[in-house]
Amino acid sequence: MPHDRPRRPGEIVFVVLLLLASLWLFWQSVLISGFSGLSTPGVFPMLASGVMVVSALWILRDTAKRAPDGGGISRFLEQVTPLRQAVMLGLVAVYVSVMPWLGFVVASGLFLIATIGFLWRRNFRLTVGISAVALGVIYLIFRVAFQVVLPRGTLFQGLF
Amino acid sequence: MDILGFLTLSWFDPLLLFLTGAGTLAGIYVGAIPGLSVTMAASILISFTFKWDVNEALALIAGVYMGGVYGGSRTAILLNIPGAPSAIATAIDGYPMAKRGEAGEAIGLTTVMSVFGGFIGILALALFAPFISKFAIMFTSRDYLLLGMIGILLVGTLSGESFAKGAFAGALGVLIGMVGLDPMTAEGRFTFGTITLMGGIPYVVAMIGFFGVAEAFVQIHSLNLPVIKQKIDRIIPHFSDVKRYFWLALRASGIGTIIGALPGTGGDIAALLAYDDAKRITKNPDVPFGEGAKEGLIAPEVANNAAVGGAFVPMLTLGIPGDAVTAVIIGALYIHGLKPGPLLLVETPHLFWFIVGNLALANIFLLIFGLTGIKVFTKIVECPKAILIPLIIILSSVGAYAIQNNPVDIYWMLLFGVIGYFLKTYGFQVGPIILGVILGPMMDSNYRRAMIGARGDIGTFLWDFASHPISLVLSIAFLLMLLSQTPIWPVLKSLISRKTNVSNQ
């Protein structure tokens, strides 16, 4: 039942974005092979993105019917992207972008120390200790036992 | 004789035996730790194991699957937090039992009954899959198209807030699966002229993003888990209990196997239905439901483990995943160059019997690990999420990278993770997306084959759906399911009831 909870902060904006993305994807699907035949590569993408457009409209209708949450952007920041999530996302983004440069081992070590330190807030030595043990176990299991190739960095010339 | 050999292959091969055992043990922990899901573990594991021999990879994954479905029950009983969606119903009666000081008994009973359910599911797989497979050879392209649509529809309707959200997620998955060169004409689809996109988006990366990273971000909301210590004494269940609930367990196994075998529905739905069923058929429980009734503990746990065997049936015979985990396992089979479908049993019967034997072995390990090591277990489960979440992200990154040693895949993973986080926050399920990614390309090629078979004539194409018995049955099933979700349904229902009222007067 769509009416039993109020709208979540930012929900209507999100659904509108989904609708716009669906329309754009539908347009991209039409560009593949147009309406030239029924068994062309573009038919199924058009069907799928068509379903997306219709269901996004339906979701929009349901969402618009809900009682507005009120509170605007501040509530959105508080409930959907609180500081913790935003900082974590930033740290993950930094982590994946420096990995080709620092290599997996160094980047992951720093990432673990930063994120565990940030989320857990215990003393620094314990954080570093836990990070080191966790990283050691991951390295042993995946690099040594599973023989998985881990990304190496350009900075240390393939050492890590 | 051959069959027996393949069936027991993993029982006597030390490496396979070890991998199955390790997988089951790991699965129990993964399933039990809230925030880690079996689908997450399976999708990350697949990226590591795809260079292995197929038997070894399957042994590990079967163990993780079996153990993971069961593992969720432990945290449900001990902490009132279902470790996995399939254990939601378990918490309703399991936790009150633990509060009464019967945690050990609850865990013991759950273990024995889960193993029982697991065996029924495996038995069903061994008995029915060969028949269904023979039958499935008669399926045509349009039947596969219908099965795919039914699968996405089922998972879309039964999970999440609304049908529209399920449909949206399924269609999004189908589109993600379409990216890259079209396998029939080699035309680019959604490649935007870049070479990177021509090979498509590896679905394992999408899985890791949606199930691993997105889930990790959602978990940040609930960092501080209240830890409740439970006293655990007797674990081996009373034989009288096992005997008393035998018929209930058998019934729940049936529900679990059938629900598991339906394309798109798995252990979580099976568990809820079995709980509901047990509640209806148990007239006078010793303890009321919701306050620690053993019936309410047994039924969902039997059903979710029975669903494992059931979920393998459509996967191995039709190439259609029974639930999200089997969708991931199908991905693994493709990576290993196998083609799940009706010909799998004809061309590679050894693989089928190996899987059956391996699941049975995992089930035996489940019994052993389930009844031991609970003390250590309670310590590990208390691992703070603040440590767990960074680890999930690192493991996900290693997994995404390992598929083709391409750092770009890690960026994809992060992108899907962020999209998945917002989708989850606003009440969308990510399960249908993964099913769509797996089933999309299959549905696309079957649709086009069926259309070419009808010589591009829409009338002939539609008539084919009604004029062949198998297609007709599937079409009716699909339409009924679709109708029941649209606003037309209540109108139809009231029309029919009005008509019968009028004719009665």
Image (cartoon, coloured by chain):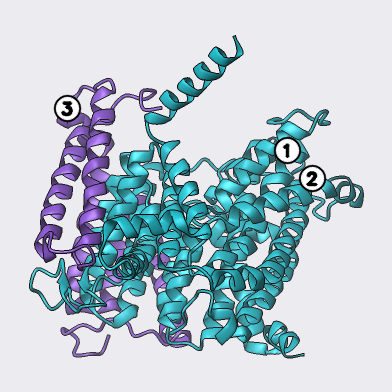
How crowded is the residue under tag 2: few (<14 C-alpha within 10 Å), some, or many (20+)? some
Q: In the rendering, at what x and y percent does residue B63 appear?
A: 60, 71
Image quadrant in which you'd find residue B401: bottom left
Image quadrant in which the C terminus of chain B is located = top right
Q: Mark 2 or mark 1: which comes first in sequence?
A: 2
- The amino acid on which the numbered mark 3 sits, given as a three-letter code, is Gly
| Circle 3 residues within 10 Å: few <14, some 14–19, many ≥20 | few
Where disc 1 sits, the SS reads: helix
Mark 1 — on which chain does it sit?
B
C-alpha span from label 1 to label 3? 46 Å
Please name the color used to draw chain B: cyan
To the question of a shared chain for discs 2 and 1, the answer is: yes
Q: Which chain is purple?
A: A
Q: Is residue B349 visible?
A: yes
Q: Same chain for marks 1 and 3? A: no
| Residue B437: image location, x then y, percent | 34, 63
Q: What type is the residue that disc 1 sits on?
A: Ala
x 15%, y 31%: residue: A73
User: Residue A72 got which mark?
Assistant: 3
Under mark 2, the amino acid is Leu
Q: Is residue B139 left or right of residue A65?
A: right
Please determine whether, in this image, residue B274 is positioned above or below residue B416: above
| Front-lying residue, A76 or A106 | A76
Mark 2 element type: helix
User: Which residue in the structure is indicated by mark 1?
Assistant: B278
Residue holding disc 2: B248
